[in-house]
Structure formats: structure tokens, C-alpha cells
Amino acid sequence: MKQLLMGNEAIAKGAIQAGVNVVAGYPGTPSTEVLETVAKNNNGNIYIEWSVNEKAALEVAAGASYAGARTMVTMKQVGLNVASDPLMCLAYIGVKGGMVVVVADDPGPISSQTEQDTRKFAEYSKLPVFDPSSPEEAYEMIQAAFLYSEQYQTPVLFRPTTRVCHACATIDVPETVPEHTWEGFVKDPGRWVIFPRLSKENHIKIEARNAQIAREKDNPWNTIQGSGRLGIATGGVSVSYVKEALENLQSSLAEKEQPETDLMKQVRLFQVGMPHPFPEALAEAFLNEVDTVLVVEELDPVIERNLIYLCGKYGKQVRILGKETGNLPYAGEYTNELVKSALAAYLQMEEEKTEPSTPPQMPVRPPVLCAGCPHRASFYAVKQAMKGKRAFFCGDIGCYTLGNAKPLDMVDTCLCMGADVTIAQGLKRTEPGTTAFSFIGDSTFFASGMTGVVNAVYNQTDIILVVLDNSTTAMTGHQPHPGTGMTMMGDVVEKVSIEKILTAIGVTSVETVNPLDLQASVAAVQKAAALPGVKAIIFKSPCIAIVKPDGACRIDRETCINCKKCIRELGCPAIVVRGGQVEIESSMCTGCGLCSQVCPVGAIKGGQHE
Amino acid sequence: MNKSILLCGVGGQGTVLASRLIAASAMAKGSEARTAETIGMAQRGGSVVSHVRTGAGIYSSIIPKGQADLIIGFEPAEAARNLAYLKKDGLVIVNRKAVQPVTATLGGMHYTGEEMIDYLQKEAQVVVVDGDAICAQAGSVKVLNIVLLAVAAASGKLGITVEELKEAVKKGVKPKFYTMNEQAIDLAVESYKGV
């Protein structure tokens, strides 16, 4: 049946069609929906888990693949950094059951710390990588990836980008689901136990395998179209921008009454769907037929540098244009317009541009903490408690990174998951007199925060750990985690207690507070700041997106003096000024009551705190 | 006939569901569809855009600038922000009510939305919808997306009739909410006829 599927859903349904048996991952935009879609469409035969982090996910999948099960691991590009230790080693050991590591890259970046390119990681780890250009190609390609992995007994990387992951297309998916059975784990230390000697032997085999793959000319994901001497090489979502631009340029020729000019007879399009091992034989054939090549690819110049390298290797006089020649940018996401401009210039065609006149000054709309978000209350309490005192506020990855925005301005540093705990320790060592706070979410605490706390306790570095426990993985769309007591298989399990972990590690003071109780929260922070050692405050209040709102607050007109303190101090999107009067937008307000505790004249009524 | 429709607004206004409903309606008629949406951090009160393209032989799920047949603006400034996507003879359907960003409230920026609507009217053919009034009549602020879609269907620029939209809504929303959505569609169509 034809369905409208998001790229991530297409990847999931393709994996199901490929007979996937085990799926493990850690949430991260733009990859999250892959695992969720497998879970929604599980006929009961697939084991699915949100692992504690990407390293754990990859290792769980590797174990199952050793036994012959087909496995998929899902993560975003920065997650691959966490999983890189097992992946680099697994590249040497290999697998038995097909194993596809789906790593979603995020050009822009739209919701990430880096613009790293997983195709480069494929080169570094020597693993094959698939790079789909559209949701429908992703659906077909992931099925091929499983077979490829099994054929070569190696994990393979599969790297869609945001615009493939989050775009929808019409895809025909069969109703029936094939089943894949596995042999079971066969003990063979010569195969599954990594030792230096085995690594050297396998290294030789890997290089030979990759050289053989590079000579293949019939890989369906690498194609050449057109018959001209002007080469264009592209891969990933840029393929769709190139094709769209060629079609637009062709129709602008028709408008200029030059319909006899067929652009596809002027250009030759090299589409690279498997950029590693680079299809050297096919690329050589392509380079033989062109005078120049414009390379259009987001992120790193992977195709571009491979072509430059091959020109040297085979002594070809072909000029390669792209990022290295300034024709296209290295950083940021590509667009239809950017690619069309580059192509128009390359094909020496005029480009017509009509932009509307300058609009009035636009309001900027950065993402903000939601109205009623308990993180706002937690940050505000720490800010109040530390007023006039020097303190470092180290933040982490999650919704609470948005605590950096004014007026809260409570995130001094943010690097990668778990780093808040340890960066706070480094800062503390440089300024012992300053109070060092580290803010971490519940899911992030389990993923990579715990070891940092052990480090602080062991090395006697005084920090205040603030766990913002909203009982979910909020930023990526509310996934369960070890503290929620729910698994992706739908089981209700014992919740892993953050309090007990911290106590067991040796944190001397662990206090759990409801952040929406401002007075109690400020008192807890002040108490912790006065104590020596590693202290923890757990601000526990559920994400407002997973609980029903508690009514809305309202402003008593008679009492309100319009001082706007609520706006200046909290920056809640539900508090607005209309006609000079402060108002609460009842459709947004969740009744958290934080503003009613901040109002100096008690003009805000309703909500939880009343 | 290929159609490119851009929906824009503020995170949480329901643009994603609206774009899926357009695609579903088009697919019910045997057409192919592509969409591209903003998901993730920007959803938290940020500007969001959904691209919907229906028909056949479409490469990019993102609409090139100057090629949208229709812009459905859930918020006046967001419609103005994306005007460059509109075709020369395209139509803008825009909700009248401005959503104040926190930055504007904090900075004391005066922004009512009317200046954005004036600008849109100078640049393009525009239908302004009092979406919030219709939502209030229908009984929920959550049906704003359905109201705007209904106006778009009534305008004839969506490539989907009001009846086809109702069919898609029937399949796409929970049964207990259907009556409210149907009422919202009827009210929106009435209001459009009144323009």
C-alpha cells in the first residue's frame, strides 16, 4: 500500500522488510523516529531498546549480530562519537548477522553541536557507507545495506541527513513482513576475541575488500546520467537540489525560446550513493568523459577530494570545482537556491531572481523554554540563591540548554553530553573560591553524567550537581529512559533511582525538591552552597508536555501595578504585553505558578502554588 | 497538476499535522506527495515551516523560492518572513493574530501583526482569516490548523476540495474530535464566503 512516510519511517519500515531482529539506539535529532517507528510496527518478533547511550546500543547490537541476528543501531552524528570506541574495533572483528549503523547527520547544524560528516567517519573506520538522497531511496537502500553487511560480514554505516530524515514521500510498502531466523552464537575465539595479531590479519583483509568494492561498476547506488562534457558529481540530499535546479534551468531555457537546448546533453551527472569505499572504477569512467566537474555535496568535500585524488592517480586533466575552489560553501545546509546559483554559473546561464521588497522589521523567534517548563523554575531558583555571589553554571545537551537565553542567562558553558559535570570540575580547580554548578537532565545523567560524578567524588572536587529531572527525554520527543520505569518493549520495570546512585557514589548531600516551590528550591540551593564536598539537588517535576495542565494563572487587574517583573525575570512565553498591560495568554499558560511567586504585589492568581 | 504549498507559523501551532492532511488528501486522489518539516529544537516556540508538494515528478521536498502556489501563514510575521517562496500570482492565507515572541516582550518591541498584514497586502494577493474567532466558536484553539486549511480549500488554491479535506480529517484525527473539526471547517468556509 502507498503511504506517506517520513524518511526515518521509511528507514524503519525498510529495516523491518529486511528482517531486522534487534534494534538499539539513543534518541537524537534527526534520527529519533527510526527506532520509534520500528517499535510502533513491531509484530512482536523484534527486540527494541533505547539503550543508555550510543556505545551501549552499538555493543548490544554487535552481540546479537555475532549470533547471526540482523541488527540496526540508531543515533545522531554526535552519538557516533560516543559509539566510536566499539565501532572502530568492530570494524576489525566484523559481524555475522547483517548490522546497519544508522547515523543521521545534521547539516546546518539545525539541532546539533557539530557539522561532522559521517562519510569521513566511514573512511576513517574503513566501513562501507550508504548515503540516501530521498526517503524513497532510503527505504530501498537500507534493505540493500543489510544484505551488503551480511555479504561482507562487516557492520555498515547508513547516513541520512536531516532533509532526508524529516522529509516525507509516497512509498509503497508491502503488507507482509518477511522473517529472518538466525543460527545462534557459535563459539570461536579466533574470530570474536580481538587480539593484536587478529587485528593485523583482518586489517589486510579489510584493505583488500575495500579495494575490490572500489573496482565494482555495477553498484546500483552509484550512477551516471546524461551525455555532456560538463560533469556534475553529487550525493545525499544535494541530488534532489541538483535535479530540481537542472529542471528549473531547463524550463527557463524554454521560456527564452531555446527549447532545443537539452541540458542533459550538456551535462553528465555522477550520483554517488555509496561514497565509501569510493567507486573508483566508475569515477574513472566518468572522468574520462568530462572536461570539468562541479561537485555538489553538503558538509565535507568527500566526493570532491576523491575525484581530485583520482585525477592525480590516473593522470587526468579534469578540473574539479567545489568547496576547495570556492564555488560552494563548506559550512551550513545547502538549499535549492544555493545549488541553482552554483549550477547556473557553472553552465554559464543567467539566473533570474525576483525577491519581494524589504519586509518590515521582523521579530526574532529563537527557541525558548515552554510556558510552564519546570527548568525555568530550577534555573531561577539557583539564580536567586546565588545572587551577588560568583558562580559557574555549566550546562548540558537537552531542552535545558535553552536556559542560556535572557532573562535567565544561566548557561555559561555547554559542550557535549555529560560534559557539564566535568567542565565544572575543571573550572573549580582554576577558581577554588567560586561555586561550580553543573546542570544535567535525567536522561543525560544516565547516558554520560554518572562517571563525571564519580570523578568529582574521587578527586575531591567540590561541585553542586543539579539534576533537572522531568521524567522523560524531552528535547527529542519524550522517550523513556532508565529512570522512567518504562521500556521500548512496553514493559514496566523498576525505576533506576538517581538519588540512590548519587548516594552510593558518595555524594554527601542529595536533596530532592519540587522546583515550582520557589522558596524551598532557593533554600535547598543555599544549603548546598554552604556545605563542603560534592552535593546534589534533584529538581523533580514532570515535563509539561507529558502532564495535563493545571489550569491557567490570571492577573488581577486591580492589584497589578504593571511593573513587568514577571516578564523581566522569567521570560515565560505565556506572559505578554497587550495595549501596555501585562497579560497571561491562557491558551499557553499551564498554571505552574512560578510567576505568582515572583510577583511583588501578589497580583497573579490561580495555578498550582495557590 | 503539481502544487507547492508552504505552511509557516510558530512551534506548537499544528503546522505539521496540517501538512500531512494536505498530502493525505492529494494521495487519496492518486497523486504523489512530498513534505519537509521543522522538527526538533526549533519547535520550542521558534519559527517553523512545512513544505508540501503534490503531483508527480517532483525532486526536492523543499519548495524553491518563488515557486509556492500558496502560503498558509499561521502567524502574520511568519507569513511575511517566508514571502520570498511565493509565486508571482500566488495566494497568501494568513491568520490575523500575532504570536508575541519572548524577545519582543522583553525588548519592548512594538509588534501587533497588522504591519505584517499591510506589507503582505502590498506584495501579494492575501486572504486574512480571523482564525481565533472561528476557533472560539468551534470550541478549541487547537483547530486553528483545520480552520486555515478549510479556507485554503475554499479558495480553490489548495488543489483539494472542502469535501476531500473533510475525508482526510476524518481519517487523520481521533473520532471524538471529528465533530469539532468538521464544525471548524464549516465555520471557516462560511467566513471565507463572507470575504
Image (cartoon, coloured by chain):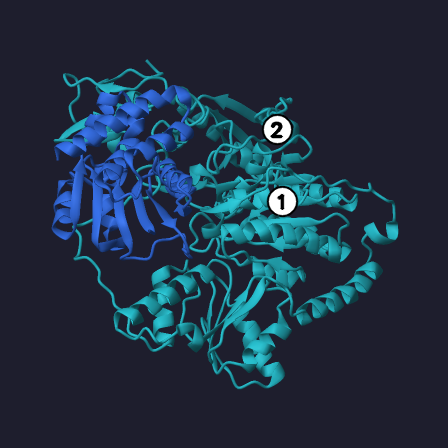
Chain colours: A cyan, B blue
Front-most of A499 and B178? Answer: B178
The reply to whether the C-beta atoms of the residues labelled 1 and 2 are less than 8 Å apart is no
Q: Residue at x 12, y 35 (%)?
A: B195
| Residue at mark 1 shares a chain with residue at mark 2 | yes
Q: Which one is in front in this view, the residue at disc 1 or the one at disc 2?
A: 1
Mark number displayed over residue A487: 2
Label 2: how many residues lie within 10 Å, few (<14), some (14-19) or many (20+)?
A: some
Residue A14 in the image, given as x and y percentages of width and height: 60, 45
Amino acid under label 2? Thr
Determine whether, in the image, residue A189 is placed left or right of residue A259.
Answer: right
From mark 1 to mark 2, how far is it between C-alphas? 21 Å
Task: Evaluate whether residue A363 shows in this view.
Answer: no
Label 1: how many residues lie within 10 Å, few (<14), some (14-19) or many (20+)?
A: many
Front-most of A99 and A494? Answer: A99
Residue A425 in the image, given as x and y percentages of width and height: 54, 43
Residue B166 in the image, given as x and y percentages of width and height: 33, 30
Q: Residue at x 34, y 78 (%)?
A: A348
Identify the secondary structure beneath mark 2.
loop
Mark number displayed over residue A586: none
Disc 2: host chain: A
Mark 1 / mark 2, whichever is N-terminal: 1
Residue B77 in the image, given as x and y percentages of width and height: 22, 44
Identify the secondary structure beneath mark 1.
helix
Judging by the rendered image, the residue that carries numbered circle 1 is: A15
Disc 1: host chain: A
Amino acid under label 1? Ala
Q: Quadrant of the C terminus of chain A?
A: top left
